[in-house]
Image (tube, grey):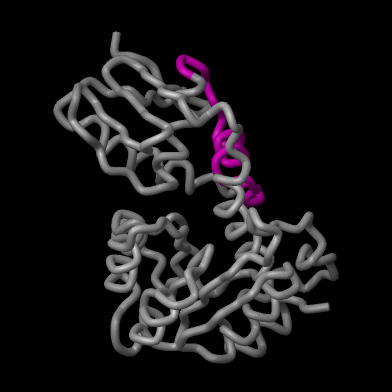
Amino acid sequence: MLTSGRASEATGGSVNPGSHQPRSTILGQLPPIRRADGSPIKVLLVDDERALTNLVTLALRYEGWDVETAHDGRDAVMKFATTDPDILVLDIMLPDLDGLRILQRVRASDTYTPVLFLTARDSVSDRVTGLSAGADDYLTKPFDLEELVLRLRGLLRREADAAPDEAEETLSVGDLVLDVTSREVTRDGDRIELTTTEFDLLRYLMRNPRRALTREQILEQVWNYSFGGRTSIVDLYISYLRKKLDPGREPLIQTIRGVGYQIRPPQ
């Protein structure tokens, strides 16, 4: 069985060995996720570290997924167009086109593909840049293979878990309106562009207006997995939403001290 300790050794530290204590791995042990037609999930993995792509490919194949790899930006753009992946794992730092430019091309395509950024940079500004460009999630090197798999599964499950009766759903809180069918969000008639993760977070908040939601509840419902107590990603995405929803207006998302967050119309 693949372990993250061996992963770190093989990649020179790009994958985190984690605890030295023996522990069971989740790789290949979770309920399978497949495409709607029953075929394997298709992943495009882009990173210039070949040892890393070899190891991550092995981990994702434990999930029963098909993995295509690219080691530079131009190859990534070509393979994205020809393979039509279900999800994209994309390193920001590449030898030719950087990941941000690749993401721009992906988002300009007609179909939506979830994107998880891999980055060696852990500053807030770097994360904001990547996520604001349209990425759905990010993972900082070194990382655990188990966490990568959980994050990818969370992204894939968001649409698969949507209830059939959501198709015509329209949500509103004050002058904020979210249309599930078109995935459009407006406030006082002004359209607001959101990334997929921002949209899913806002949808969850708007389905529970005036309800105080804990960070753990939000993490479980929006990301579909646990960060092992690290809920700072919820705070980060709340700050993104506030910057897009609130400029020049009364704030809608309130911090409930000691609990989490709540969305409600301005008083």
Q: Is residue 176 above or below residue 65?
A: above
Q: Is residue 228 left or right of residue 187?
A: right
Nearer-the-camera pick, 108 or 200 = 108
The C terminus lies in quadrant: top left
Q: In which quarter of the image is residue 199?
A: top left
Asked whether residue 55 is drawn in magenta, I would say no
Q: Quadrant of residue 64?
A: bottom right
Q: Where is residue 63 in the image (x, y as percent from the top left)?
A: 73, 67
Asked whether residue 210 is drawn in magenta, I would say yes
Q: In this view, does 17 lie above or below 130?
A: below
Q: In this view, does 205 lie above or below 87?
A: above
Q: In this view, does 83 lie to the left or right of 57?
A: left
Q: Where is residue 214 in the image (x, y as percent from the top left)?
A: 56, 30
The span shown in magenta is 209-229
At horizontal 51% and vertical 68% (from top left) the residue drawn is: 85
At horizontal 67% and vertical 72% (from top left) the residue drawn is: 60
Q: Position of residue 207 (x, y in %)?
A: 50, 23
The N terminus lies in quadrant: bottom right
Q: In this view, does 246 lie to the left or right of 29?
A: left
Q: Position of residue 49 (x, y in %)?
A: 50, 88
At horizontal 60% and vertical 65% (from top left) the residue drawn is: 148
